[in-house]
Image: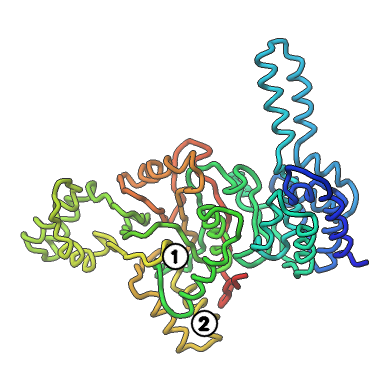
Amino acid sequence: MSLSDLITARAIVLLQGKSARSPIHRLMDDDPFCTLMMRHRMEQGVGLPEQDPGIPPSARLALLHALAAGEGVAEARERCDGRRGLLAKLSKAREISDGSIRDILVRSMEAMLEKEDPNSHWAAQYLLYGAERILQSAIALHESDTSPEAAAAVVGAMMRRPPDTSLTITDRDPVTGATGFIRIGRRPAHFGFPETGSPKTGTNAAILHYEIEHPGGAFCLFTDCGGPIGELMGKIHDACPLYINDPHQLMALNSYWLREMGAFCVPCGDTQITFLDRDGVVSASEYPDFRVDVDRILAELSERGLSSEGLNGIAPYLRGERGVPDHDYDLIDRVSQANPDLLGYLGMQLDRSQIFGIPLDGLRALATGLCDGDEARAEAAVTAALTGAAVLDMPAGPLHLYVPNIASPNRSDEAEPLLNAVTGRKDGALMFLLADRPLDIGPDPHAVTTMRRVLPAAPGAGPEPG
């Protein structure tokens, strides 16, 4: 009997009998089942990285190593889930003399011990999903009414899929200790899971911070585009991991896209965005705040030859005056397009509900790869992608992207004031800041989390949507 058959047989045994728990939770709880999955994946070529001595160790990686060794699994799982510490605290809580406090603490501890998704489950799920994102067929494993036979069939099908042999398990910044997504595989559609915090976002921070290695020069911001690049963006979006809500997918995938392409993708809704570059900090917002720069902008426009009538026509807009329903938007558009350094790239019409950002060199390398080295087709693809795009000149080196964490309902409302405090403005519907330097967001240690240190994309490399 093959390992795949043994795994399927073990799944059927584990799933017999009635239970309110879904199949995925019952399977991930079982050490022999997880050990069999590890043996099978290793035979398929999966390898594990060693713990990095320069950063705090990952209990999840330790569990995977224990599964690979076939020993110490129960102890590694206990450390991963922290059950020993919880049991010790529960024992002390039961000794408290104050009955009301004792009951509250005991109930809280017992709930934590009965948590349906302990940390060890996230590590074991890598072995189940392997190289692919969570497929539609796998959702049945998360539903408690799925029959044992149907669940075992899903498991068997997953075990037959070849895994990606690349695995990165710990993704912490060694200086700040900020923790990002644990990542599986090399492709953006691969399933990833967070090390800490919310099981959907990996953090309770108000702002997500990404780093982009920029070669210098043109940095392109666009939404929809035709040609092979537009098709790729659509495929990536369609290949989002399933069983996660859309905002969480976009937050997670942003980390992958940056790694694979040197590009970012920020959700923004169906609206118009203005990009403003002020001293190396680019803001993207629906309602830009020009009030702090009104006098300087008007003086500069005057020196550049804008008539008094034009200055008077644009001044109320720059001052953010309300109750003026007849802003001359034709004038505003013309002046903005002629003076993007002052008024930004105004009113980019969004045909897709995301903004993509990528260095021009990276866009050309991506196009060359997609067009199989055909330079003429690649140049046409770049031209199509840049139609209607905003192209900003940014210095070489790491760029810092700060995105409101829309997937964290408790913190997302705090993101915009924190980001506006950096720029000294009050932009409305602020989508992101892109800066040529790290920004000081303030003293709150949970305000920002660094999702990943991004490596430069390989020339011509592009993700392969799953």
Vertical relation: 301 (above or below) 291: below
Residue 62 in view (yes/no): no
Answer few, some or many: residues within 10 Å of disc 1's Cα (few below 14, many 20 plus, some between 14 and 19). some
From the top left corner, tell me how far across and down residue 324 is, in percent. Answer: 13, 50
Residue receiving disc 2:
368
Residue 415 in view (yes/no): yes
Q: Secondary structure at mark 1?
A: strand
Q: Nearer the viewer, residue 252 or 26?
A: 26
From the top left corner, tell me how far across and down residue 67 is, in percent. Answer: 84, 53
Q: How far is disc 1 from disc 2 in space, using C-alphas?
A: 18 Å
**Residue depicted at 47% across the width and 55% down the height:** 400
From the top left corner, tell me how far across and down residue 239 is, in percent. Answer: 57, 66
Residue receiving disc 1:
356
Q: Nearer the viewer, residue 397 or 113?
A: 113
Considering the image in quadrants, where does the N terminus appear? bottom right
Answer few, some or many: residues within 10 Å of disc 2's Cα (few below 14, many 20 plus, some between 14 and 19). many
Question: In the image, what residue type sits under mark 2?
Answer: Thr
Q: Is residue 426 left or right of residue 95?
A: left
**Residue depicted at 43% across the width and 84% down the height:** 379
Vertical relation: 331 (above or below) 441: below
Question: In the image, what residue type sits under mark 1?
Answer: Phe
Mark nearest the camera among 1 and 2 is: 1
Vertical relation: 256 (above or below) 389: above
